[in-house]
């Protein structure tokens, strides 16, 4: 089986009753472990991302949200961090990965494989761009920043669609996850509710119970609960789809009670070479399957800031409308007093009448406390690291230091995302395109074919490495002819091409002859100006280093390129 929309009946080992019972026991254990996290997840959603509260169930989609939220610092920082991750890791319609020859290949084999890998990379990127990947991965980044764990369903699109891929951000309330034997979060149980017509379309070979068919004929909108199980095994990932029943049958299934109609019906079984569910975490504690998020770390400050703003607003309402006191002099009746312009308020002789009560509290102190809380929240959610710099015109050195600081702070989290998100995305995409015959049988094993990360964050680190190397080359050339002999110009140029992500088609293969010399001038025409052939003489490494500094610093706020003195 290659896709759940085209099942291979009986291909999986879980088709018998004993296998289904084992799956249900594992699902109930995974669901019980997930329930321990739901309280913390609800707090994170309530105070940092109230628009996603329905993802855990219990909330009506489209209903009023954020009734407990008074401070918008955390939701704004969550949006900024998710948008920055989208731009830094998987920028839409941009080259954020490359397929390259692995270290086990010789230089001649690398040169032969380069065009094939470049072509496969282009096809894979084109299908990502033609799909709904950018929309769904952003929703996953929001879940990742808020809850610490996210799940992305990666399926093959039906024939006739613009692209071969179809993505869906899976709400965390719909999945129960567990770690497999390798420590990856690849054991997935997803509960979905679908109309009977959608079940027939998704699993056309499934035989539905006659009573369900009869009821569906009377109720066209009848929905049923389906439990999808993806479990790693020796051959890859076993897949089983179970029909739990109607209504709340999936909940009853997880609690161990019998579903409607007895045992669940097996809709489809099969096998995946690469899991269709990509689950990834921000960071994890030892012994825990689910991840922990930056919102969880900042939650005490978020709750405190929310309470401070609530109290400040109450104090402000008192300051605006006022609290009044009056002597019980037998003349003034507070029930009949209206505080409108032109009102005459009677009072007894010698009575103070209606006087305002001074409100307690100091707005200045509240603002000082609130400023510190908001600063800590933004720091915990990395808004100060990934946001736009205060000074738009930064030098190349400043950009290098900023990139180094970003890599230091985000190295652990982004390293985990490269392993749990980016590499599985490319592997799953290659598996789908191999089945469709659009790419050759390429397998991402890290030895023959390797994945090169070309996202902006990875490019910043590689440009920093290139800047260091060019600084060394310039320093060595300053030592005279003896130092210059140490440098291999062609090897340095090829290393820079690999480091900066230059396509293999733009680099001449090793050992290939250079371009032909200039042709003889036509009679009656002046000779063309002399242009030194590439590779002749020493390259101007100093100019290249200055140009690379311009790439690092980027264009200034005015929109023009960075100017460098000759």
Image: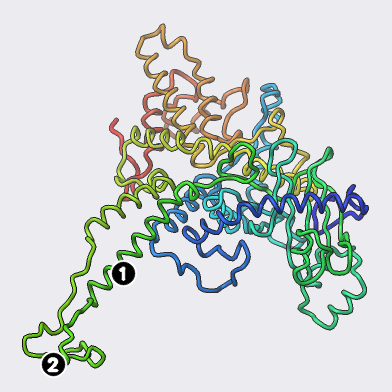
Q: Which residue is mark 1?
A: 314
Q: Is residue 482 above or below residue 43?
A: above
Q: Quadrant of residue 42?
A: bottom right
Q: Relative to 386, is 120 on the left or the right?
A: right
- Comparing 335 with 309, the one in front is 335
Q: Is residue 364 left or right of residue 248?
A: left
Residue at 31 percent of width and 35 percent of height: 564
Q: Residue at x 88, y 59 (%)?
A: 266
* Residue nearer the viewer, 297 or 88: 297
Find numbered disc 1 in the image and state the secondary structure of the residue it sits on. helix
- In this rendering, is residue 513 above or below 261? above
Image quarter of residue 193: bottom right
> How far is disc 1 from disc 2 in space, using C-alphas?
30 Å
Residue 468 drawn at (x, y percent): 42, 24
Image side of residue 33 versus residue 346, left or right? right
Query: x, y percentage for residue 300?
Result: 43, 51
From the top left corner, tell me how far across and down residue 70 is, in percent: 39, 64
Q: Quadrant of the C terminus?
A: top left
User: Is 260 above or below relative to 133?
Assistant: below
Q: 10 Å neighbourhood of mark 2: few (<14), some, or many (≥20)?
A: few
- In terms of depth relative to the viewer, which is nearer, 539 or 81? 81
* Mark carried by residue 346: 2
Residue occupying the far top of the picture: 482
Using the rendered image of the protein, determine whether residue 232 is visible from the camera's viewpoint: yes
Residue 120 in sight here: no
């Amino acid at each position: 089986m290659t896709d759940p929309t085209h099942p291979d009946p009986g291909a999986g080992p879980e088709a018998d009753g004993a296998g289904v019972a084992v799956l249900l026991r594992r699902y109930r254990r995974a669901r019980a472990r997930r329930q321990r996290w739901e309280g913390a997840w609800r707090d994170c959603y309530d105070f940092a991302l109230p628009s996603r509260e329905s993802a855990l169930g219990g909330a009506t989609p489209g209903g009023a949200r954020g009734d407990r939220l008074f401070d918008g610092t955390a939701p704004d920082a969550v949006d900024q961090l998710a948008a920055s991750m989208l731009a830094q890791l998987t920028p839409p319609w941009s080259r954020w990965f490359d397929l390259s020859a692995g270290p086990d290949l010789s230089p001649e084999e690398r040169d032969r494989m380069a065009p094939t890998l470049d072509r496969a990379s282009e096809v894979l990127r084109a299908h990502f761009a033609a799909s709904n990947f950018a929309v769904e991965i952003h929703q996953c980044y929001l879940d990742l920043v808020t809850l610490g764990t996210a799940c992305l369903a990666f399926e093959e699109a039906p024939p006739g669609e613009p692209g071969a891929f179809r993505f869906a951000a899976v709400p965390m309330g719909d999945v129960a996850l567990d770690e497999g034997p390798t420590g990856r979060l690849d054991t997935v149980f997803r509960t979905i509710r679908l109309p009977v017509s959608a079940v027939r379309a998704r699993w056309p070979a499934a035989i539905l119970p006659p009573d369900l068919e009869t009821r569906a004929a009377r109720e066209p909108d009848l929905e049923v609960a389906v439990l999808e199980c993806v479990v790693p095994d020796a051959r890859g990932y076993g897949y089983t789809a179970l029909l739990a029943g109607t209504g709340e049958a999936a909940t009853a299934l997880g609690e161990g009670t019998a579903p409607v109609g007895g045992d669940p019906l097996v809709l489809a079984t099969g096998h995946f070479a690469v899991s269709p569910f990509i689950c990834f975490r921000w960071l994890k504690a030892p012994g825990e399957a689910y991840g922990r998020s930056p919102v969880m770390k900042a939650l005490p400050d978020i709750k405190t800031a929310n309470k401070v703003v609530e109290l400040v607003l109450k104090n402000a309402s008192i300051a605006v409308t006022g609290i009044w006191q009056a002597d019980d002099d037998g003349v003034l009746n507070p029930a009949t007093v209206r505080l409108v312009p032109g009102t005459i308020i009677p009072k007894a002789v010698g009575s103070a009448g209606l006087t305002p009560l001074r409100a307690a509290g100091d707005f200045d102190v509240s603002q000082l406390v609130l400023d510190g809380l908001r600063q800590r929240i933004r720091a915990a959610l990395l808004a100060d690291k990934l946001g736009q710099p205060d000074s738009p015109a930064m030098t190349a050195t400043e950009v290098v230091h900023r990139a180094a600081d970003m890599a230091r702070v985000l190295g652990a989290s982004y390293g985990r995302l490269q392993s749990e998100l980016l590499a599985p995305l490319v592997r799953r995409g290659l598996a789908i395109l191999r089945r469709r015959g659009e790419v050759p049988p390429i397998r991402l094993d890290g030895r023959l074919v390797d994945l090169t990360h070309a996202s902006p964050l990875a490019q910043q680190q590689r440009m920093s490495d290139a800047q260091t190397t060019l600084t060394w080359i310039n320093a060595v050339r300053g030592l005279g002819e003896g130092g210059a002999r140490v440098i291999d110009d062609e090897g340095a140029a090829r290393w820079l091409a690999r480091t900066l992500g230059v396509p293999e088609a733009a680099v001449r293969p090793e050992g290939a002859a250079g371009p032909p010399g200039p042709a003889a001038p036509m009679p009656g025409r002046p000779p063309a100006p002399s242009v030194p052939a590439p590779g002749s003489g020493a390259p101007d490494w100093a100019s290249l280093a200055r140009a690379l500094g311009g790439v690092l610093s980027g264009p200034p706020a005015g929109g023009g390129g960075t100017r460098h003195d000759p």
